[in-house]
Image (cartoon, rainbow, N blue to C red):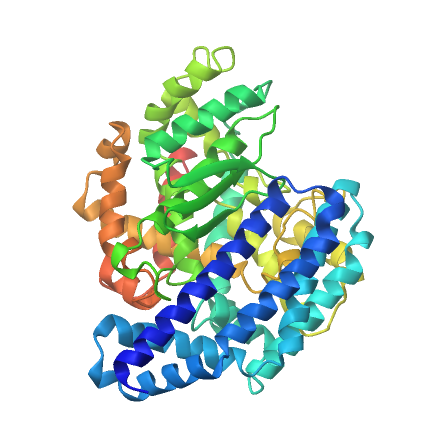
Amino acid sequence: METKEAINVIREYGAKLRALRHAMGVMQCDAMVCAPKNSAPYRAATGAVLSGEVYKLTTAPERVEAIELLSQMSGETDELTRLEVKELKKELDMLTKLPPELYREFNRIKGEASAAWQAAKAANDHSMFEPYLDRMFSAARTLAQHISPDKDPYDHWLDRFEPGASQETLDRFFGSVREGIVPLLRRVLEKPEPDTSFLHGHFPVEQQRKFSDSIMELMGIDRDDCSIAEVEHPYTMGLNKHDVRVTTHYYEDRVAANMFSVLHEGGHAIYEMGISDELTGTALAGPASSGIHESQSRFYENMIGRTLAFAELITPVAARFFPEAFAGVDAVRTWRAVNAVSPALKRTEADELTYSLHVLVRYELEKLLMHGEITAKDVPCEWNRLYKEYLGIIVPNDSEGCLQDMHWGSGLIGYFPTYSLGNAYAAQIDAAMRRELDADALIRGGRIPEITAWLGERIHKYGRTKTPEELVKICTGEPLDPKYYIDYLTEKYSKLYEL
């Protein structure tokens, strides 16, 4: 096989694999948004068959030969091809260590567990989910042992979502975050709470849908490439840069939850849609890591959405859709309200200061579950214990407690820490951006796409051609340093609460 022929082989197989993965992604979106309840086992079976076909194509002898040849002849190919082959070989080496039946079984369990989680949450009964959760963690351990037999199984999954991450690095990271946040939180909670009453009331869903459209318009999101739908637990799926699915959840009694959901998921979408056209149709047309992906969602949610400048932009928009609630509300009042610190039950609705403590609870539980130190039956009790210890909160039920997240039912074990890493990346990127741009003036003037352009040139366009470490250095000139995150929170909340 010659070099040119090998390149054609990986392109042909790549097109088929993308088609299958697109179909599986659409099916997953359908499952979360609109599929009937009783379709779950049939959809899980379909997913297992499709994943089996993905396995066959990925490990096809002709494709394997082409990847191995190109790996040995990197000097004869251009830079993008070299990078793509490196990415393909990494995936191939991992997959070929798995028996095909194990790969199919893991995907079948994910389909069943996701449906079981939805049913358990609706019924407020964690016991309905427990057998599926145990099977999920057992399967995750087995996969890790096949792929990385010399590595702790949890470290394997952490590295999958954030290359280079491990329990050792994350224990240090969370230790720094905890040392910075907990004393600051205590000082903040001694101060009077801002007035948030106008964010609670009656906000008709139809008006919230229109409000969501306006937020996406302000963000500069091209709706021809990005849809929005309603689900139990918001997420974004980038099937390709011209097919990005944003979701949100509407609560009729509070409006801020949806606003920040759209900003957060919209940040994910902007990243997906900003990947260079040059990478379309290659294995490089994706995010550098989950932590970098989360840095973009948290950037739009917090570094833009929770600023006084954004409050000045969005308050009159909100008043147009909800005139009764926002009557007489000025931007400063909005800014103080959306930044109010009040330890809450739900991670997705947590204030910015306590957010990483929610993530820490999940990180601690994942370690215990992955190492078999607890089982699914123990999760509610341990969850409630940690929420009391870290956040001072009594958890009233499973739906608002250990069943609030979709992640474990979807096989996203090891993903949670990337949310806090994303916060740290975002704070450091924000500090660098503000040295070059008058970000507040741009936000206040409704010129958010100009901020997107800055991020696009330093992060979005690169897709997977750069590592997270490389991207942070491109943006900021230095490696990730959690000090920026702690300093950002300290400065912001000292000002807000007059500490």
**Residue 349: quarter of image:** top right
For the N terminus, the image quarter is bottom left
Residue 109 position, x and y percent, is 70, 63
The residue at the far left in this view is 436
Residue at image x 47%, y 59%? 19
Residue 27: x and y in percent read 58, 51
Foreground pick, 158 / 332: 158
**Which residue is located at x 40 percent, y 34 percent?**
496
Seen at 73% across and 72% down, the residue is 373
Answer whether residue 365 is visible to the viewer in this image.
no
Name the foreground residue: 122 vs 2. Answer: 2
**Whole-percent x, y for residue 392 in the image:** 65, 46
Q: Is residue 94 left or right of residue 274?
A: right
Relative image position of residue 480 (x, y in whole percent): 34, 63
Q: Is residue 443 visible?
A: yes
- Vertical position of residue 26 compared to residue 58: above or below: above
184 left or right of 126?
Answer: left
Name above or below for residue 5 compared with residue 121.
below
Q: Residue at x 43, y 46 (%)?
A: 244
Q: Quadrant of residue 334?
A: top left
Q: Nearer the viewer, residue 180 or 198?
A: 198
